[in-house]
Image (cartoon, rainbow, N blue to C red):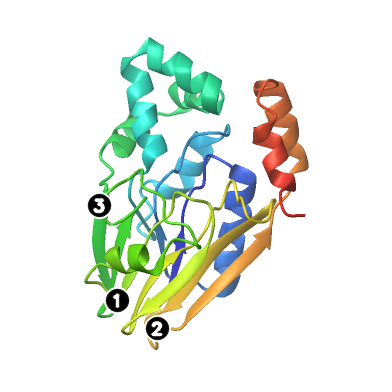
Amino acid sequence: MKIAIMSDIHANIYAFETVLNEFKRLKVDKVLVCGDLIGYYYWPKEVLDHIVGNDMFTCIRGNHEDIFKETLSSNKAALFYRHKYGSGYDVCKRDLTVSQLEWLDLLPESLEVDFDGVTFFMSHGSLTSTNEYLYPDSSTEELIRNYSNSDFTVFGHTHYPFIHTNNGKYLLNPGSIGQPRDIGGYSSFVTISTHNKAVVSHKIKFEIAALALACRRNDPGLKYLENIFNRGL
């Protein structure tokens, strides 16, 4: 079985659909999503239309799902996060269906799954926190502390991919689908074969012109939302 691991889609339908097409070419069987399906960009409904009810996907929540929930109950929080991250949460509130909202709210913070006897522990930030950051240059001691008992421990949150091994186990971050911060405009993800535990890192370019135009129209005061796609190029 071929497992794909992804994270941080951030409602970027252009990147997400490009990756989904690549999954078809690679003949991916199952997809693990390590949180942050929403936030920043403007197509949360379209992203969830692909995922909700599709047993190919196993998802957990990230900090942006938590933030969105906070904006629903606090106008003060909604204003604060609109200034910080843009209007993506407003689009969520406007466009997501009742069933999609309920589905997001029920996502777990962490999850352990088993495919063909190969185990995966999923969390967004670290072993114990949705909001903690583990970067490629984190200390060896910090990385070792964040191994679970599973064969693969997988995180997201930083938007920077890395793979670390210790005693025959793996700790990895697939990077970001929707807002990569190492090389702009290139989604990154990982595939793993349950047959031999082979790990392959992937990068695939997505179209940014229409996305950049949407950023200028929806959040002209937040240049970061567009400029991030030029990072590292």
- Mark 1 near mark 2, Cβ–Cβ under 8 Å? yes
**Foreground tag (3 vs 2):** 3
Mark positioned earlier in the residue sequence (3 or 2):
3
Q: Which residue is disc 3 drawn over?
A: 128
Label 3 to label 2: alpha-carbon separation: 25 Å
Q: Amino acid at mark 3?
A: Thr
- What secondary structure is found at the residue carrying circle 1? loop
Compared across the picture, whether 148 is left or right of 39 comes to: left
**Foreground tag (3 vs 1):** 3
Q: Which residue is disc 1 drawn over?
A: 151
Q: Which residue is disc 2 drawn over?
A: 197
Q: Amino acid at mark 2?
A: Lys
How far across and how far down the image is residue 208, in percent?
Answer: 73, 44
Front-most of 21 and 7? 7
Label 3 to label 1: alpha-carbon separation: 17 Å
For the C terminus, give its image quadrant.
Answer: bottom right
Label 1 to label 2: alpha-carbon separation: 9 Å
The reply to whether residue 211 is visible in this rendering is no
- What secondary structure is found at the residue carrying circle 2? loop
How far across and how far down the image is residue 62, in percent?
Answer: 37, 43
At horizontal 53% and vertical 62% (from top left) the residue drawn is: 161
In the depicted structure, whether residue 211 falls above or below residue 171: above
Q: Residues within 10 Å of mark 1 (few under 14, many from 20)?
A: some
Front-most of 125 and 26? 125
- Determine the image quadrant of residue 226: top right
Mark positioned earlier in the residue sequence (3 or 1):
3
